[in-house]
């Protein structure tokens, strides 16, 4: 599928490929930039090269799964245990964590549970609409205080919560993955840096390297 006018990467990152395919099907007759390719449109040998790439990727995955240490999570856990829930800077005892992918949020949920953090809410494209009320009750400072709940004190989310939702009962945000698009980063921060935020906002970013622009 070639669709220059659609945010194809966003759909893929947010694990919404089925929705993307449906959208392309509905627009293909009115949008001349959309192109749907069939097997015959590709050069001979292309499929064989894809299969070869797939074998290489599987080998890399196998090698990766043999690694049982994670220095990035270790560093995060150090901050989590010693700083992120310090009542001086985090009086509401709430924390927002953003990641680029559902695989990472799944992983973080499991790791956090294993380290004794049980009040963790994971949000992604598949469960977001079912958790709207729960998110509001636990993280939205604009609802009446009589509706405040504390079932969860950590929310771990993909980009699906980067827009259109208030999370400002929390005042600390961790970008476990830092998006290359700075606008996305500001959208994430805007979830807690809002009118009615209950405390000064603190932002923690994991950068991909020590030297990064």
Image: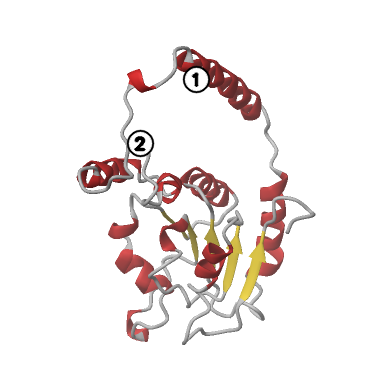
Q: Is residue 46 above or below residue 211?
A: above
Secondary structure of the residue carrying numbered label 1: helix
- Residue at x 43%, y 51% (from the top left corner): 10
Residue plotted at (35% across, 36% down): 1
Residue at the outermost front position? 32
Which x, y percent locates residue 212?
Answer: 74, 56
Q: Is residue 56 above or below residue 192?
A: above
In the image, residue 38 above or below residue 44: below
Mark 1 touches mark 2? (CB < 8 Å):
no
In depth, the one of 207 and 154 nearer the eye is: 207
In the picture, measured across the screen, residue 87 lies left or right of residue 5, that is right
- Residue placed at 53% from the left, 46% from the top? 104
Q: Earlier in the sequence, mark 1 or mark 2?
A: 2
**Neighbour class for label 2 at 10 Å: few (<14), some, many (≥20)?**
few
- Determine crowd level at label 1: few under 14, some 14-19, many 20+ residues with C-alpha closer than 10 A: few
Q: Quadrant of the C terminus?
A: bottom right
Name the residue carrying label 2: 1
Q: CA distance from mark 1 to mark 2?
A: 17 Å
Q: Coloring scheme of the render?
A: secondary structure
Residue 198: where, in percent of width, then height? 52, 85
Q: Position of residue 22 (x, y in %)?
A: 24, 43
Q: Is residue 210 left or right of residue 4?
A: right
Count of all numbered marks drawn on residues in the image = 2
Q: Which mark is residue 50?
A: 1
**Viewer-closest of 54 and 148:** 54
In the image, is 208 to the left or to the right of 160? right
Residue 113: x and y, percent? 53, 50
28 over 159 or under it: above or below: above
């Amino acid at each position: 599928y070639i669709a220059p006018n659609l945010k194809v990467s966003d759909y893929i990152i947010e694990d919404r490929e089925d929705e993307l395919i449906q959208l392309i099907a509905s627009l293909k007759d009115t949008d001349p930039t959309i192109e749907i390719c069939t097997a015959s449109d590709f050069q001979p040998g292309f499929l064989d090269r894809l299969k070869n790439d797939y074998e290489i990727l599987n080998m890399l995955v196998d090698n990766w799964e043999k690694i049982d240490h994670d220095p990035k999570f270790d560093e995060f856990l150090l901050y989590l245990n010693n700083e992120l829930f310090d009542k001086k800077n985090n009086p509401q005892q709430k924390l927002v964590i953003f990641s680029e992918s559902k695989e990472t949020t799944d992983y973080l949920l499991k790791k956090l549970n294993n380290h004794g953090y049980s009040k963790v809410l994971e949000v992604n494209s598949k469960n977001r609409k079912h958790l709207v009320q729960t998110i509001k009750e636990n993280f939205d400072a604009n609802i009446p205080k009589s509706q405040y709940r504390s079932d969860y004190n950590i929310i771990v989310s993909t980009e699906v919560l980067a827009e259109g939702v208030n999370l400002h009962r929390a005042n600390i945000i961790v970008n476990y993955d830092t998006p290359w698009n700075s606008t996305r980063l500001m959208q994430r921060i805007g979830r807690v840096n809002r009118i009615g935020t209950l405390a000064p906002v603190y932002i923690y970013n994991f950068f991909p390297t020590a030297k990064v622009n």
